[in-house]
Image: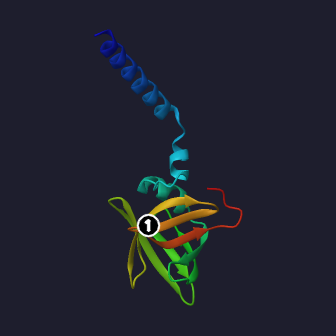
Amino acid sequence: MKLVGCSAFLTAVLGLIILILAATYPANVFAQAGEFLAPTEAVKVIMDGKPWSALSGEGRSATITLNRDGTGTLQGPITLSISWEVKGHDVCLNLKVDLLCLRFRPIAGGYAGYKGPKLDLTLSRSGSRS
């Protein structure tokens, strides 16, 4: 009987230690480990009005600027005015010819945008720290 009581006590203590560690662990470490950013966090760090070098999943490159007000510019072979909005867990880019809804995760020098499990857009800046 004493072993059962002791085991329950140790389990409770271990659970408490795990909760304390999880609460004090820096949140950005989880994102660096491969977690997607919440859409509000993605908007905060990506939609800053500064140009990003963009590389599509098909290997096409462009420069994209996304403003906090939901507007932006895509400069490639032609220049397009674009818009963006948050829809659920995704940030959706309206490229006029396509609606690209992505979830972002930080990578070295920028952010990777995923459409489902597929990497579909990479945003980077030289000298960027994510």
Colouring chosen for the image of the structure: rainbow
Foreground pick, 8 / 36: 8
**Numbered disc 1: secondary structure:** loop
- Above or below, 52 relative to 13: below
Outermost residue on the bottom side: it is: 77
Residue type, mark 1 in image: Gly
- Left or right of 105 in this view: 6: left
Give the percent coordinates (x, y) of residue 75: 57, 82
- Above or below, 76 relative to 10: below
Q: Quadrant of the C terminus?
A: bottom right
- Total labels drawn: 1
- Left or right of 123 in this view: 99: left
- Left or right of 126 in this view: 103: left
Give the percent coordinates (x, y) of residue 51: 61, 70
Quadrant of the image occupied by residue 84: bottom left
Residue depicted at 70% across the width and 67% down the height: 126
Outermost residue on the top side: it is: 2
Foreground pick, 19 / 109: 19
Residue where numbered disc 1 is placed: 70
Residue depicted at 55% across the width and 61% down the height: 48
Give the percent coordinates (x, y) of residue 10: 40, 19
Outermost residue on the right side: it is: 127
Foreground pick, 48 / 90: 90
Residue depicted at 47% across the width and 62% down the height: 104
Q: Quadrant of the N terminus?
A: top left
Quadrant of the image occupied by residue 65: bottom right
- Above or below, 36 relative to 20: below
Foreground pick, 83 / 111: 111
